[in-house]
Image (tube, rainbow, N blue to C red):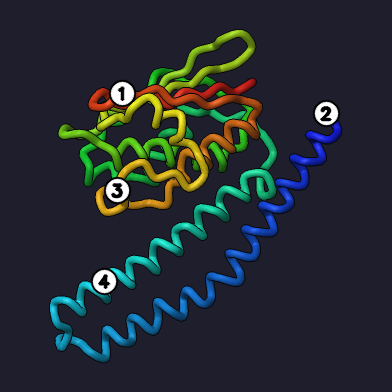
Amino acid sequence: MEKNNKNQKCSTEEDLQRLAYAVSHDMREPLRMIASYLQLIEMEIGDKFTEESRTYMDNALKGARDLNGFIDGLVEYSRVTTDGHKFELTDLNELIEDVKLDMRNEIKASGAEITYSQLPAILVDERQFLQLFRHIIDNSIKFQGESAPKIRIYAEAKKGTVEFTVSDNGIGMHPENAQKAAGFFTKLNPREDHPGCGMGLAVVKRIVQRHGGELKIQSLPGHGTNIIFTIRP
C-alpha cells in the first residue's frame, strides 16, 4: 500500500509538471497575442471609445492580465519541488529584512507595520522562504481592515520542530473558509475587491510541506488571521 501511495504521488507530481509546462508554453504566447492586439485596437480607436465600449475593452485587458496571473501561479506552485535549492543555515531575521526591502513599495503604500521577535537560524531553502514570507505578508496587506496592517512574526521551539506564527489585524475570515484558504486557486473574496489568482497560500503550504512541516490557518471575521506553520530544524 505504501509503495502504491508513493507511485501515485510521483505520478501526480509528473502530471502537475506536464500541465504547468503545457499551460506556460502553449497558452502564454496566444495570451500575449490577445493582449497585444487589444492594446493595438485601443491605440487605433483612441478617444473614439463610447463609455460602454471602453468598459468592454478594460474588462478584456483585465481578463488577459488575470489569466496571465493564473499561469504564473500554477508555474510557481509546480516549481516548489522541481526548482528547489539545497537547505542552508539561514538567519531568518536577515531574511525578513530582505523581504521588507523587497516589498518596501507595498509596505509604504499600505502603512503596514511589520515586527518580529528574535527568529532562529535554521536549515531552509532561503529562496523559497523569501517566497513564503512574501506571500503571507502580501496577503496581510491585501486583506487589511480599516486600520493600517500590523503584522507580527514570531517563532517557538516545540517538540523537535520550530513553530512560526504570522499574525495580522486584517479583515479575517470565517473558520470554515480558513481551512480552504490554502487550496488550489482558492478565491474567497470578490476578485474586484481583492485581485490575485488565489495561489499564494497554496504555494506557502507546498513550501512548508517540502520542509517537512504543516500549515494551519486560524481566523475570525473582523479579528485578523494567524498563519501557523512548523519546520523541522
Q: Is residue 186 left or right of residue 145?
A: right
Q: Residue furthest bottom?
A: 44
Q: CA distance from mark 4 to mark 1?
A: 35 Å
- Compare residues 68 and 141 and report the one nearer the observer: 68
> Which residue is labeled 2 in the image?
2
- The residue indicated by pointer 1 is 220
Q: Earlier in the sequence, mark 4 or mark 1?
A: 4
User: Residue 58, labelled with which disc?
Assistant: 4
> Residue 189, located in which quarter of the rendered image?
top left
Tell me whether the residue at label 4 lies in contact with that at label 3, contact meaning CB atoms closer than 8 angstroms. Answer: no
Residue at 15% x, 86% y: name it: 47
Q: CA distance from mark 4 to mark 3?
A: 18 Å
Which dot, 4 or 2, sits closer to the camera?
Answer: 2
Q: Would you call the spot at circle 2 few (<14 residues within 10 Å), some (14-19), or many (20 or more)?
A: few
- Rounded to the nearest whole Å, what is the CA distance between mark 1 and mark 2? 38 Å
SS for tag 1?
loop
Q: Amino acid at mark 2?
A: Glu
Please give the residue where the numbered disc 3 appears in the rendered image.
Answer: 190
What's the amino acid at mark 3?
Pro
Quadrant assignment for the C terminus: top right
Kind of residue sitting beneath label 1: Leu
Q: Nearer the viewer, residue 128 or 38?
A: 38
* Residue that appears at 46% across and 34% down: 180
Q: Position of residue 23 (x, y in %)?
A: 59, 64
Residue occupying the point 77% across, 43% down: 10
User: x, y (%) of residue 166?
Assistant: 40, 25
CA neighbours of label 3 inside 10 A, class few (<14), some (14 to 19), many (20+): few
